[in-house]
């Protein structure tokens, strides 16, 4: 039985999707803890209602980013994690922290990487006039939003889309691809070869939604 530690800063909807899939699909794993840097994060109550241990470590209580990351690593390691999952954890992590969990920490980003790293991805996608947008699950590396890609979800950008509507549709897509990526990781099915993630045995690493529905 493997241990998954999930880090959140807000509502934690991806965390909930992962926890639900872990339970219903009977993964050989458990959510050992959900940790937030914000005591007010709504996802903490959601996790606790599922019987998942929760913890809060405020970044405001630490003088430097390095000090916070060191304390966070100590807290995480208390749960003996096999996989660390960033699910809306709104912190830029230090290189030392990233290296500590190299190969066993993944993140989801609301764009089709390498396009639109960083913040405000949906507004930037609309401003750029892209016709396809989506989300990417990737291994975390010291370079922000540039780790090897595990799986992507893509959808058409509709003429009627606003930033809010596009964000909502992409989030629904995230809830489908992130549990799949986490399951592959805890089943030891992921291998990075020359910077490219391979799944063994192979499964599609792209989920495409056409218009309002699936293709």
Image (cartoon, rainbow, N blue to C red):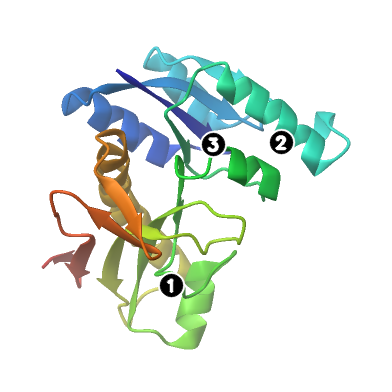
Q: Closer to the N terminus: mark 3 or mark 1?
A: 3
Q: For the C terminus, which image quadrant?
A: bottom left
Dot in front, 3 or 1:
3
Q: Give the image location of residue 193, x and y in percent.
A: 34, 60
Q: Quadrant of residue 17?
A: top left
Residue placed under numbered mark 3 in the picture:
8
Indicate left or right for 45 with 143 as reference: left
| Residue under the image location 39 percent in, 41 percent down | 14
Residue 69 has which mark? 2
The residues tagged by marks 2 and 1 sit, at their Cα atoms, a distance apart of: 36 Å
Residue drawn at point x = 29 percent, y = 47 percent:
190
How dense is the environment of label 1, judged by Cα within 10 Å: few (below 14), some, or many (20 and up)? some
Q: What element carries label 2?
A: helix
Quarter of the figure that contains the N terminus:
top left
Q: Position of residue 37 (x, y in %)?
A: 66, 32
Write the residue at 58% across / 24% down: 76
Query: In the rendering, which numbered label is found on residue 162?
Result: 1
């Amino acid at each position: 039985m493997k241990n998954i530690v999930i880090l959140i800063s807000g509502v934690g909807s991806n965390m909930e999707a992962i926890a639900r899939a872990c339970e219903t699909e009977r993964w050989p794993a458990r959510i050992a803890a959900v940790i937030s840097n914000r005591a007010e994060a709504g996802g903490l109550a959601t996790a606790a209602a599922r019987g998942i241990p929760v913890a809060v470590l405020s970044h405001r209580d630490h003088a430097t980013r390095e000090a916070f990351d060191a304390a966070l690593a100590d807290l995480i390691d208390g749960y003996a994690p096999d996989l660390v999952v960033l699910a809306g954890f709104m912190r830029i992590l230090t290189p030392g922290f990233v290296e500590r969990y190299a190969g066993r920490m993944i993140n989801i980003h609301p764009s089709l990487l390498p396009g639109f790293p960083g913040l405000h991805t949906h507004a930037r996608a609309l401003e750029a006039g892209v016709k396809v947008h989506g989300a990417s699950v990737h291994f975390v590396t010291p370079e922000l939003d540039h780790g090897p890609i595990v799986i992507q979800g893509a959808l058409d950008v509709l003429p009627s889309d606003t930033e809010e509507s596009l964000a909502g549709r992409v989030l629904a897509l995230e809830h489908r691809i992130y549990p799949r990526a986490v399951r592959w990781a805890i089943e030891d099915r992921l291998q990075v070869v020359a910077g490219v993630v391979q799944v063994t045995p192979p499964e599609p690493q792209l989920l495409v939604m056409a218009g309002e529905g699936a293709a």
